[in-house]
């Protein structure tokens, strides 16, 4: 577990350093996880007989995901600390949440349709009902 956490933190550090040095508009931890993904994909191509993700890394990641909800506690505490601001600006905050949610759903749907058209994979009614196709 220590080995996996060290690896996660090392990639986060590399991502944070790269994001700041290159002045990228991407959070360092996100860049670090993208780099970790790239390394794991390259590892799979260089060693085809190896597991895509080492067991020790997968077990630690699964354990962290099981307790992901704990990461929302600091955000909730932050909301409580700024309750007066929320009371003053609730309309703007609510509107921003609704508009951004609708925009994200619309962009996701548009992207799905565009990719489906590009790959020319259209499901027929039978495939959607579970009837198979061939």
Image: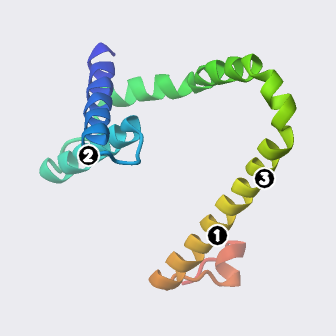
Kindly identify which numbered label has been placed on residue 22: 2
Name the image quarter holding residue 99. Answer: bottom right
Q: Going from the N terminus, do you reach mark 2 or mark 3 first?
A: 2
Query: Where is residue 131 drawn, in percent x and y?
Result: 67, 77
Name the image quarter holding residue 5. Answer: top left
- Residue 35, placed above or below residue 3: below
Tell me how many marks there are: 3
Do the residues under discs 1 and 2 have CB atoms within 8 angstroms?
Answer: no
Q: Is residue 131 toward the left or the right of residue 58 in the image?
A: right
Query: Where is residue 21 drawn, in percent x and y?
Result: 24, 40
Kindly identify which numbered label has been placed on residue 109: 1
Q: What residue is rendered at 65% in x and 24% in y?
A: 75
Q: Which callout, 2 or 3, points to the residue nearer the camera?
A: 2
Q: CA distance from mark 1 to mark 2?
A: 32 Å
Q: Quadrant of the N terminus?
A: top left
Looking at the rendered structure, the secondary structure element under dot 1 is helix
- Residue 101, placed above or below residue 84: below
Q: CA distance from mark 2 to mark 3?
A: 33 Å
Q: Going from the N terminus, do you reach mark 1 or mark 2 first?
A: 2
Q: Quadrant of the C terminus?
A: bottom right
Q: Is residue 121 toward the left or the right of residue 95 in the image?
A: left
Name the image quarter holding residue 27. Answer: top left
Extreme residue toward the top, this view:
2
């Amino acid at each position: 577990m220590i080995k996996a956490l060290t690896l996660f933190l090392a990639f986060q550090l590399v991502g944070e350093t790269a994001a700041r040095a290159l002045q990228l508009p991407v959070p360092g931890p996100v860049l670090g996880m993208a780099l970790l993904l790239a390394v794991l994909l390259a590892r799979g191509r260089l060693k085809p007989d190896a597991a895509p993700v080492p067991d020790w890394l997968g077990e630690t990641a699964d354990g962290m995901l099981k307790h992901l909800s704990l990461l929302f506690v600091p955000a909730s505490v932050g909301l409580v600390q700024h309750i007066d601001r929320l009371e003053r600006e609730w309309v703007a905050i609510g509107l921003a949440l609704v508009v951004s949610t609708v925009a994200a759903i619309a962009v996701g749907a548009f992207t799905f349709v565009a990719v489906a058209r590009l790959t020319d994979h259209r499901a027929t009614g039978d495939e959607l009902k579970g009837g198979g196709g061939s």
